[in-house]
Each structure stands twice: as C-alpha cells, then as structure tokens.
Image (tube, rainbow, N blue to C red):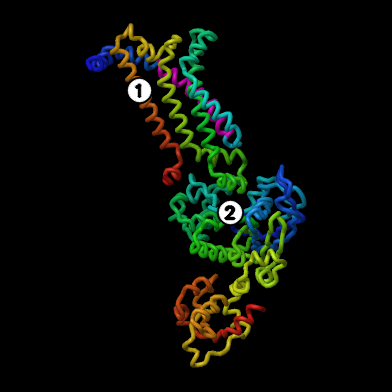
Amino acid sequence: MTQVRPETPAAAQDIVFDHVVKTYPNATVPAVDDLSLTVPAGEICVLLGPSGSGKTTALMMVNRLAEITGGDIRIGGRSIRDLDPIRLRRSIGYVIQQTGLFPHLSIAENVATVPKVLGWGKKRIKERVGQLLELVGLPVDEYGRRYPSQLSGGQRQRVGIARALAADPPVMLMDEPFGALDPITREHVQDEFLALHERIRKTVIFVSHDIDEAVKMGDRIAIFREGGKLAQYDTPRTLLKEPADEFVARFVGADRGLKRLTLTRLADLAGSGELSPARPDDRSLPVLPADASLRAALSLMVAEGTEGVLVTAAEGAPDADGAARADGTPAGGTGAGGRVLGVASLDAVRKAGTA
Amino acid sequence: MSTFLGSFTFMRDQLSLLLDKTGQHIWMCAVVVAVSLVVAVPLGLWLGHLHKGEFLTSAISNIGRALPNLAVIAIGLGIFGLTFTNIAIALLITAIPPILSQAYLAVDQVDPDLVRSARGMGLTPAQVLFKVELPLALPLLFSGVRIAVVYVISSATLATVAGGGGLGDIVLGQATYGLEGVIAAALWVAVLALAADGALALLQRVLVPKGLRAAR
C-alpha cells in the first residue's frame, strides 16, 4: 500500500467476499459459512444479524484480525492474503464500539496514531490531525489537548471516526460503532456520519444488530443467520419489500412496511408529481417540511386524524433524518413558514410505500 | 517511655553509626530492588501481553508471601554460608513476587477492546505493548514496586543474621546497643520505608500519563 497524501483522497475500492469460510480451532461448525458478496466501491454495507451469526467475524477477516480458513477476500482486486497483515491494517480504517480510544493519549495523539507508525513527518501529522478534527466538528485548538475521558460519548465517537480516517484509507470497518450511545446521541452521530460519508465516499462495512440502524445507514444490507450463513443481501428497500424467507421477515420485523416508509421523503413525492395541489380548506391540515419521511407523514396523519399533510419546502440543507425530528414535533411546528408544495394524501403515501 | 525518649538520645549520640548502617541498608536494598525490577518487570509484562502464566505468577506470588525470610536465610546458611548471596536470595524472594504478579495483572487487565483497536489499526505486537499496554499498566505496576520496596527495606534488617550489615545490626543487637538503640534503628527503618514509598509515589505521579489521572 502506498501512502496516500491527504491532498489527494484515496479512491474507494470494492470489497469482494469470495466463498469465505471461517472455522475457529476446536469448533465443529464454521463461524462464517461460505460467504460471498460484493460491496461496491464507495457504498456502505451493513452486516446485520443476531449475536453469534458471524457478522463481527466476517468484519474482522477483512483486516485479518481473524484469518480466513477458506475462500478469499479481495480489496480493489487484491487478495488480502497477499498483503502483510500490519500493512493491510494500516490501510484500513477501524472503528469499534466504545471507539477504543486510548485513554492515556490526548485527542490529537489518538488521531495521530496511524500516521505516527507510518512514519509521517511532524508537520504533516499536525496538519492532518487539524484537518480531520475540523472535519468531525471538534476544532483541534479546543479539543486536541483534551483526553477521551473529558469528552461526551458522541464526541468520542467522532474522534474514533477521525482516527480511523487518519491515513485516508480507501476502506473502513465499523464494528457496532454507535452501539453504546444513547438513542438521541446515536441519531446525531448516525446523521453526521452519513453526511461525512457523502463527502468522503469510502467503502464502509458496518456491523449492527439493529434493523433500524441498518435501514438508515446501509446502501446494502447483508442479513446473517445463526451458523454464519448469509440469509439475504439486498438494498434496504428490496429487503423490506421482499424478504427472502421466514427468518429475514421475522428479523426485519412485522412493521417492515412502516420501515420502508422511512426510506422515502415527502420531497420524493413532490419530485414525482404525486402531491395534490393545496386547496384553501387544506390550510387546517398538519404541516411537514419536504425533508420529512413518509413514515413521519403517516404518523402525523394517524395522530391528527387527517387524510393528508401539507408539505412545505425544507429550509436550508436537507436534514438527513427529518422523520425523527418531525415525529416528536406537534403539527405545524416545523416548516410552517416555508413555501407550500402541496398536499400528501394518505393514499399517495400508501401507494409510494408499496412501490 | 524513658526508653523511647532515650532512643532519640541514641540517634543524636550515635548519628554517624546510624548513617553508616543506613548507607549499607540502602545499598543492599537498592541492589535487590534493581535486580528484581530487571527480572520481574519484563517477564510480568510479557506474560501479561500474552495473557499466559496466570498460574505461574500467582503461584510465585503466593509462595513469596508464605515463605518467611528468616527460614530462607536459615536454609541458605547451609548452602551459601555467611554471604551476601544468601541474604540477596532471601530478599529477592520477597521482592520479585509482588512485582511480577502486579506487572502481569497490570497488562493482563488492559481493556481487550483497546488492544483489538490497536491491533486493528496496524500496530505491531511490540507497539501494542509499549504504546498501549505499558502506559495503561503503569499505575498497577507501580503499586507492585512500592509494595516490594517497603517489604525489602523492612526485611533487610534480617540480613544481620547472615553478617549482611545494615540497620539490622542495631535492631537485632540489643546486647551491644541497648533497647534505646534497637528502638532508634527500628524507627529509622520505618522512616526509610515510608520515605522510599513517598519518593516512588512522586515518581508515579510524574510517569503515569496525564489522561489516566484525568480519568480518576
């Protein structure tokens, strides 16, 4: 792996699992059994499944913290078996639950870990650390000298992500990175990561046991069942609409229809001309901004007992998750001042949900 | 009471004798502690890094605690005679177990997630040990060293039975120095032990990474 200068971000690379098998010593059944899937470059792939389904093992094989016992994994066309494990790992970002930040090192030193072992010059490390902490919204002047124990859970998570990005790896592995956060902080960090990913476009493999997180974060979701077998690998939309079997259907939950609604925004209805024009008596309808999800719209209709919601233009940049915010906001509370785009009727929402 | 006060008179009158014996005492302890550190710290850290040898380190630690120094010296008399080697071995048996077991535990108990994180980022095993495990192990490692130093300083008084010198010459020399002398030297030993412990506590404050202190 050649070192990549931060000025020229590394292009994302695809990750291919090719009939991968992992059997731990003294185990009778494999932890991962004949896993084949391709994560296209620049996408987020969520490995989802109950505990003991081999998803973490699958992740750890990519950076050879667990050695594969059969098949092959290729990153950007190169087999990981052909690379020295230490050098391979330095070219892959790694974030784990509770972040694994080193408590005895300052925030800046934590982020500098990989550049240091790669032997970068002092000046270059300093620049890179400043750049990364800026990227995750923790300016180095204010936070660089602090220690992990002096940061909140969400801030520590952001430092963990900055640290994983330090050497500008084309690939990132994230092992239940947000698992230890409270629900509100979690939402926030998820949104931040998605926004960050829009900019940096790494190939990400993300382990989760939470279907909602998977639907939100994943371009694709790989669902594992016990025994390390891949049950289904699809986009969230397809997975929720057409579960491959009983196990997947049960795992994604009986409310998968509702979950699908989170994948579509009111703005999408407006874009495809499925909003009806607002009439004068629609003024009394509850209001939602266009960046809210269909689920939020449906929820509001049920709560208010109406047959539609008034959709207004979203203010500023589109929110990564309008649904969570809108869910808890009283009717008319958000976006009331925006330009009215039209009315999303119950029928239109239902139709879009089954599409 | 008068005997106790008399011990201070002894300290004043026999200051040069006390200082002389203290010098011997410190020298003896310093050699023993240095050898213990060289043997026990690397071994304990390495075993802890491998998470192997819990049985070995705890067994050594228990034996060291159970075995009376005097018995070791008595046995040693038959083998080595009246030599410094004999005393040194007895004192090493006092000093090595706490250092070894604490060094082992200190590294063994480092959060496995931190180690996985460090390995996952591409640190070599040596870098994991020196950049992550050792700094995190320092507080516990220091506690082991401090225990050992206090043990050695107090136990070194027994060196006199094998002709080793030190403050033990006075503590166990009531016939020569009187009860006042015994008490004076015993107090001297106690102060020496406390002073050494205090000095190590200071060193610990300097060496243990700031981030770990902030966490407390």
| Residue at (49, 11) in percent of width and height | B74
The single residue placed furthest to the bottom in the displayed view is: A280
| Residue at (56, 90) in percent of width and height | A277
Labels in figure, total: 2
Residue A78 visible at all: no
Give the residue type that dot 1 points to.
Answer: Ala
**Residue B114 shows which numbered tag?**
none
Foreground label between 1 and 2:
1
Q: Would residue B27 be counted in the magenta stretch?
A: yes
Give the residue type that dot 2 points to.
Answer: Val
Q: Tag 1, which secondary structure?
A: helix
Given residues B129 and B47, the one toward you in this image is B47
Main SS of the magenta part reads helix
Q: Is residue B17 above or below residue A154?
A: above
- In this picture, which residue range is highlighted in magenta? B24-47
Q: Tag 2, which secondary structure?
A: strand
Q: Is residue A98 above or below residue B74?
A: below
Q: Which residue is mark 2?
A: A95
Task: Report whether B127 appears left or right of B210.
Answer: right
Give me the chain letter of mark 2: A
Q: Which residue is mark 1?
A: B190
Q: Would residue A8 be counted in the magenta stretch?
A: no
CA separation in Å, label 1 and label 2: 51 Å
Where does residue A78 sit, x and y in percent of width and height? 74, 53
Where does residue A79 sit, x and y in percent of width and height? 74, 52
Crowd class of label 1 (few under 14; some 14 to 19; many from 20; radius 10 Å): some
Where does residue B53 sit, x and y in percent of width and height? 59, 32
Q: Is residue A176 above or below residue A241?
A: above
